[in-house]
Image: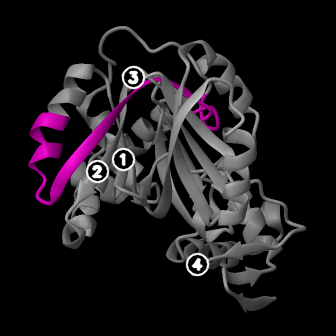
Amino acid sequence: MMRNEDQGVLINNKTDLKLIAELQKDGSVSYSDLGARLGITPRTVAKRVEGLIESKLITIRAQPNPYKLNLSASAVVAIKADPTKIDHICDLLSGHFHVNLVQTIFGRLDILVIVYFSRWAQLHHFIRNELYTIDGITHAEFYFVEEVYKRYDRFFEKEPFPNGRVKLKETDWTLIEELAKDGCTKPVVLAEKLGIHVTTVYRRISALVKEGFIKISGVPNPSRLGYSANAFIILDVDPKEVKNTCSNLYSYPEVYFILTLSNRSGMIVCVHTKDTEMLYEFLKKKISSINGLINTETFIRAVVQKTYYGWLMETNANENAVIQF
């Protein structure tokens, strides 16, 4: 059943919801296996998955494991840009492996990105020699991340970052980068691009998944699944209350992730809600009541251009999903 609404199209399709749920668990699962689980033919699975991807309801990609890959030096960068060059800037940043989130925002700034590297020196080199050289960026603000809560937990078990460099071959890093762009890339295409045998590609991808360096999954787009009001909330908090504030916010289902900061006392909270009214209620009731709250600033998400660690939708095949076109 479909009907037009102000917020998009209401779709009552249990099969697509089940497909999304299965792809979240394993984006590399075969169409034959999916068909067997859902009681439909592999050909039907292929058509439906293709439709989900083309409609940008999900993307299939490899999520790099930041713990295994030692991607411990992270920052949020909020950018002011020439309005005529925003799309170009987003395209450039989206092509960078170490940029794991790119989205346009409403507010006094225009673009918000999250970057991570193995060493702080690499992150600062990126800022000085790559970010600042992009034409159209007029101003940038940096929030250096101390701890990440909830964001990676949906994909990987938290563990200490390793000391020293990760012992992976250049071929492995290239495979990770290519699969992070498109987890559906065929091994024969990767083999041709890397100049290696296709069996080597199969073997190396299998090892990367088995050893926990990556996970390939379907990442739903919340803005096209009824969660149209997403925001980044910057909180300045009394240092004595930061830990308690994180603990309290962690339990809210609207909170997708929390980043505590090393260059200021506070945190950045990413929130998904279904509409602006719900977002307002969350800000009024949950955020404004935080003990030790000093100041807040909210950036409303406009368009997600890139994300590795997309929100895992709580699918319920007995409910409708509002899909926005």
Q: Quadrant of residue 146?
A: top left
The answer to whether mark 4 and mark 1 are in CB contact below 8 A is no
- Quick check: 136 left or right of 17? left
Dot 3 crowding, Cα within 10 Å, few <14, some 14–19, many 20+? many
Residue that extends furthest to the right in the rendered view of this protein: 318
Q: Quadrant of residue 36?
A: bottom right
Q: Which mark is residue 72?
A: 3
Q: Which residue occupies 76% across, 89% down?
A: 2
Label 4, label 3: how far apart the Cα atoms are: 36 Å
- Quick check: 27 left or right of 131? right
Label 4, label 2: how far apart the Cα atoms are: 33 Å
Q: Which residue is mark 2?
A: 79
Q: Which residue is mark 4?
A: 51
Circle 4 — which element?
Answer: helix
Q: Which residue occupies 75% across, 39% down?
A: 252
Q: Position of residue 98 (x, y in %)?
A: 31, 39
Q: Is residue 195 visible?
A: no
